[in-house]
Each structure stands twice: as structure tokens, then as C-alpha cells.
Image (cartoon, helix red, strand yellow):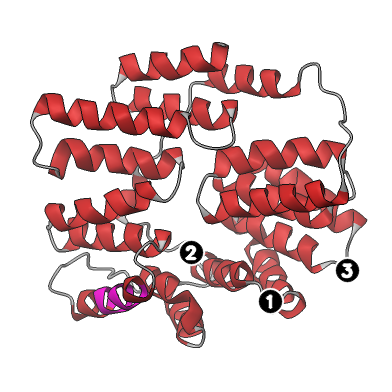
Amino acid sequence: MATPTRRPWQLINFFLPLPLIVFSLFLSGCRERVPDFTPEELVEAEMQVREAFRLQDYEYGAELGQRWSRWVPDAVELKAWTVANLAKAGRDFPAEEMARTLAAEHPDSPWSSFATAAAVTWAQDEAHGEEAVEASERTMTGLPDLIEAVLLRGDALYQFRGPEEAKAFAEAHPEVRATLASAMWPASGEASDPIVDEMLTILDGVLLEDPDHLTANLEEAVVLFVLRLDPEGAFSHFERAAAVTPSPMVHSRFWSSVFRDSGLEEAEQYARVAADVRDVVAAQGESPARWAALAGRLRRSGLLELAEEVEARILE
């Protein structure tokens, strides 16, 4: 089936300057030696890579995961989360390459199925769409308690089978109600579509239980801004989303909302964004890859002085 039409906010792609990416990767790999580490430290690294994915901090998760994958080549779960972060960061080739290697070396592992489904789905690789759908089903069977396995299944169905099948799946799995809202996005794009009220009801229910739910805040912000033309309402959700993650992707949406919807004077807008950028740079887990992504998004937004400030931190 053809790929579902993307929503308006998904059409905006931010590309990092290639030299900065190459340089950050060089820094992360040069003079590397395998350190002494305990089994507990490996478990902690796996948790951090998974947490980076949950927080949409994909560049950091990919960077950390690739480093530990070189040190511990048999860490299947770690590699699966690394693939997921790589794919979400838009690094399709290394994601698919690592997923193929995992599938060849560990064909019966549900984590290999998770990696395969993640790499193909988030690369939007139509040629292997059915492979991703089948792999997502094996993932759910093999990892029945993993919420991300359910989310991945919904994404694979949405991407390769269409929104109706994804909606039916999500209705059977209330734990992914935020994903259900995505599948319900009205094809007409009209605010008057009754389904918009249904989407907001679902998202409001998720946020009532968890006000800091990252996906629900982002989804609600987009629905309010794009469909309900309520930029002030959207701003509060972008702000809350940025407060719970150092993700450059999430923060770039917050900056746009600061300049567009916050009601601040121009100088106050810039000061607010500058403070936010410095908070991301100082976030736990120093990461040239995260900083490079941050600098790229700043340049894309025309915030050149702040981009240079972040790039100077990378050079240090």
C-alpha cells in the first residue's frame, strides 16, 4: 500500500552540516580503547540508550549505543536500541546495516526482529515494508511486555498498511493511545472534521494521567496549532515537551513556538531560546553528536551566533 500522506509538520526536515557530522563522528572514534567495565555498567548503558530513544534524544542514543556496540559486539539488546536510535536520527544506512548483521547472527532473537522492523519502518523503505510488518509481529510475540514493541507495530502498520489498519490495532491496545491519535489524523486537514475532537479527547486523557508524556504533548501541540489554529495553546505543550528531554528535534520545535507564539518581545524571545540552548548543551551525557544536531538545527533556524557557540563547544 502507498505510504500514508504525511502531516504538515512532518514535511519539515532539518539537515545537519555534513562536515560537522563527520567531525563529531571522528571525535567519538579517535584514540578509542576498550575500557574495563562491569556487567552492571553494561546494563546501565543499555538503559541509557533505551532512555535516549524514549526521550527522542536519538543522536545521543545512537552515539552511545555505537560506542558500546564496538566494545561489546554480542550485546544484542543494546544493538537493537542502537538501531532504533540510528533510524530515528535519519541515519538509515548504518541502522539497516546493523539490523541485517543482527538478523544474520541472531536469527531467533526477538531483538533482531525489533531491529529489523525499526530500521525498515523509520527509513520508510517501501521495498521491505512487509518484512517490517512481519518483524514487528514477531517482536510483539517475543517481547510481550515491551511497550516500544507495541508502538513499533503500530508504526509499521501505519507506514506500510495505512491509517485504518493502524487505528484498528491501536484501539485494541489502549496503552498506545498517543499513537492512535496519530493514526486518526484527518486526511482532509480540516479543523471541523469530527475526528479532531476525538483526537484531542484521547490526548487529553493521556495527559491527565501523565502531564509530562512526551509524545502526547507534541501531538497535542501540533493538533492545536495546525488544526485548531490555537498557537498559544500549542506553545504550552511544546514548552512542557522541551522540559522533559534534551532532544534537539523537540527543542527546535519549542524555539519555533517561542518566536511565533509566546507573546514575548523580540529580545525576550532570543534570551529564552539562548537559555534553552545552553540547557541542552549542559544536559547530562556530554555528546558531540547531540551538540552537532543542535548546531545544525540552530543554523537551519537562522540562529547563527548560537550555532557557533555550540560548535565551539564541540571543538573544545
Going by the numbered disc 3, the residue's amino acid type is Asp
Q: As rendered, which of 57 and 150 lies closer to the eye?
A: 57
Is there CB contact under 8 Å for labels 2 and 1?
A: no
Give me the disc on residue 2.
2
Give coordinates of residue 139: x percent, y percent: 72, 72
Give the main secondary structure of the magenta stretch.
helix
In front: label 3 or label 2? 3
The quadrant holding residue 92 is top right
- Secondary structure category for the residue under label 2: loop
What is the spatial separation of the Cα atoms under label 3 and label 2, in whole angstroms? 30 Å
What is the spatial separation of the Cα atoms under label 2 and label 1, in whole angstroms? 24 Å
Category of crowding for the residue at label 1, using alpha-carbon neighbours closer than 10 angstroms: few (below 14), some (14–19), many (at least 20): many
Residue on which disc 1 sits: 140
Going by the numbered disc 1, the residue's amino acid type is Met
Q: Is residue 102 above or below residue 33?
A: below
Q: As rendered, which of 100 and 229 lies closer to the eye?
A: 229
Give coordinates of residue 214: x percent, y percent: 41, 59
Magenta region includes residue 33 = no
For the question of whether residue 164 can be seen, the reply is yes
Residue range corresponding to the magenta coloring: 199-206
Q: Is residue 21 above or below residue 83?
A: above
Give coordinates of residue 197: x percent, y percent: 20, 78
Q: Residue at x 57, y 11 (%)?
A: 316
Sequence order check, earlier mark of 1 and 3: 3
Give me the disc on residue 108.
3
Q: Is residue 283 left or right of residue 76?
A: left
Sequence order check, earlier mark of 3 and 2: 2
